[in-house]
Image (cartoon, rainbow, N blue to C red):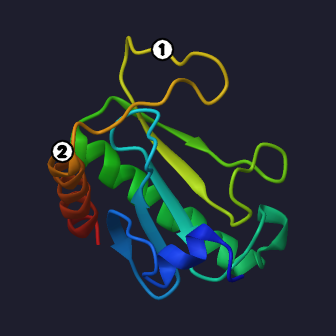
C-alpha cells in the first residue's frame, strides 16, 4: 500500500514520535491528539480492519494494546484510558489502528472524536514520547 500514511511511517518515510516498535507492531503519538499522550498502535503488516486479522495476530494485538495502554497511563499519570478503533465507518486511515487515549477525571469528552489539542512544540511532544517509552520499557 504505497499511499497508506501508516505504511509510510513504518518505512520511516514519514516522521512520527514512535514510543514502541518491534517486528510486528509500532506505536506512536497521534499528530492531532484528543488529549496529550494520545497514542496510535498499528500492525506493521498492512491490515485494514479488525475483520482482516488472523485470530493469533489479533490476540497479540490485544496483549500489546494492554501493555501500551499501561505505559501511557503510568508514563503520564492519567486516571484512565479510552480505547477506540473504527472499522470502515469513520476510519480515517484504511490501516487498522487502536487509539489509546489518556483520560482525566473532570475532563469531559465533547462530541464524536472531540476537539483536538496540540503539543506546544516539538520539545513538549518529545517529553510525552519519552515518558511513555520509559514506562513501556519497564513493562517488558
The residue that appears at 34% across and 67% down in the rendered structure is 18
- What x and y, as percent, mark residue 26? 46, 72
Total marks shown come to 2
* Quadrant of the rendering where the C terminus is positioned: bottom left
The residue that appears at 76% across and 76% down in the rendered structure is 55
Q: Nearer the viewer, residue 88 or 12?
A: 12
- Residue at which label 1 appears: 108
Q: Nearer the viewer, residue 90 or 54?
A: 90
Query: Tag 1, which secondary structure?
Result: loop
- What x and y, as percent, mark residue 20? 35, 70
Please, is residue 93 above or below residue 3 in the view? above
The residue that appears at 67% across and 25% down in the rendered structure is 112
Which mark sits nearer the N-terminus, 1 or 2? 1
Q: Residues within 10 Å of mark 1 (few under 14, many from 20)?
A: few
Q: Which mark is residue 124?
A: 2
In three-dimensional space, the C-alpha distance between marks 1 and 2, rounded to whole angstroms, equals: 23 Å
- Going by the image, does 126 lie left or right of 89? left
- What x and y, as percent, mark residue 98? 59, 54
* Quadrant of the rendering where the N terminus is positioned: bottom right
Residues tagged 1 and 2 counted as in contact (Cβ below 8 A): no
The residue that appears at 73% across and 48% down in the rendered structure is 86
Please, is residue 125 above or below residue 18 in the view? above
- Going by the image, does 42 lie left or right of 123? right
Please, is residue 67 above or below residue 91 in the view? below
Query: Tag 2, which secondary structure?
Result: helix
Amino acid at each position: 500500500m504505497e499511499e497508506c500514511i501508516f505504511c509510510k511511517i513504518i518505512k520511516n518515510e514519514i516522521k512520527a514520535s514512535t514510543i514502541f516498535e518491534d517486528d510486528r507492531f509500532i506505536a506512536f503519538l497521534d499528530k492531532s491528539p484528543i488529549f496529550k499522550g494520545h497514542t496510535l498502535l498499528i500492525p506493521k503488516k498492512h491490515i485494514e480492519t479488525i475483520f482482516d486479522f488472523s485470530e493469533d495476530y489479533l490476540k497479540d494485538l490485544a496483549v500489546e494494546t494492554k501493555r501500551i495502554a499501561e505505559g501511557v497511563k503510568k508514563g503520564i499519570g492519567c486516571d484512565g484510558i479510552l480505547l477506540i478503533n473504527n472499522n470502515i465507518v469513520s476510519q480515517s486511515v484504511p490501516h487498522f489502528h487502536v487509539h489509546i487515549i489518556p483520560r482525566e477525571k473532570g475532563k469531559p469528552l465533547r462530541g464524536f472524536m472531540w476537539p483536538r489539542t496540540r503539543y506546544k512544540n516539538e520539545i513538549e511532544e518529545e517529553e510525552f514520547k519519552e515518558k511513555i517509552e520509559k514506562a513501556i520499557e519497564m513493562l517488558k
